[in-house]
Image (cartoon, rainbow, N blue to C red):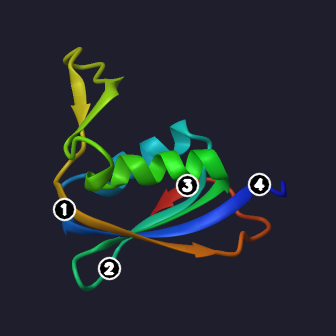
């Protein structure tokens, strides 16, 4: 594991369950070369655990966090079906990040 590998848990609040948000998050994480998971929590939030290069984890945080830019758009991601901008599903109200210790042997990014 590289020294610049980080692990961050993001807690995303809003209308993020039952709208394809975990699928979208997985696609973003895989595009960035991250490992981890996204899972629904009992309180309505989605927990996203991302591990990989610090800059890639930070970029995922920007894509998840409505305070980091335009809340419901990702300008650089084109939807193959429509040729338009792929929108983040649901509505994110807040995103809290918590740093953790990277773990050995983690592979892939899964929806739980």
The residue under the point 28% across, 23% down is: 79
Quarter of the image where one finds residue 70: top left
Q: Which sits in the foreground, 81 or 69? A: 69
Residue tagged 1: 18
The residue under the point 19% across, 62% down is: 18
Numbered label attached to residue 65: none
Q: CA distance from mark 3 to mark 4?
A: 19 Å
Q: Which sits in the foreground, 77 or 26? A: 77
Mark 2 in CB contact with mark 3 (< 8 angstroms): no
The residue under the point 25% across, 30% down is: 86
Mark 3 or mark 4: whose residue is earlier in sequence: 4
Residue tagged 3: 109
Instruction: Please indicate whether residue 68 sits to the left or right of residue 27 in the image.
Output: left
Looking at the image, is 31 positioned above or below residue 48?
A: above
Instruction: Please indicate whether residue 58 sits to the left or right of residue 3 in the image.
Output: left
Q: Which tag is nearer the camera, tag 1 or tag 4?
A: 4
Q: CA distance from mark 4 to mark 2?
A: 29 Å
In the rendered image, residue 43, in percent from the top left (x then y), is placed at 24, 85
Numbered label attached to residue 4: 4
């Amino acid at each position: 594991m590289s020294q610049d590998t980080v692990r961050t848990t993001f807690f995303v609040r809003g209308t993020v369950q039952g709208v394809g948000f975990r699928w979208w998050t997985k696609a973003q994480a895989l595009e960035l070369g991250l490992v981890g998971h996204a899972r629904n929590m009992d309180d309505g939030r989605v927990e996203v655990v991302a591990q990989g290069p610090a800059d890639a984890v930070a970029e995922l945080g920007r894509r998840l966090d409505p305070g980091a830019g335009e809340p419901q758009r990702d300008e650089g991601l084109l939807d193959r079906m429509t040729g338009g901008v792929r929108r983040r599903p649901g509505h994110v109200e807040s995103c809290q990040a918590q740093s953790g210790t990277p773990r050995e042997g983690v592979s892939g990014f899964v929806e739980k």
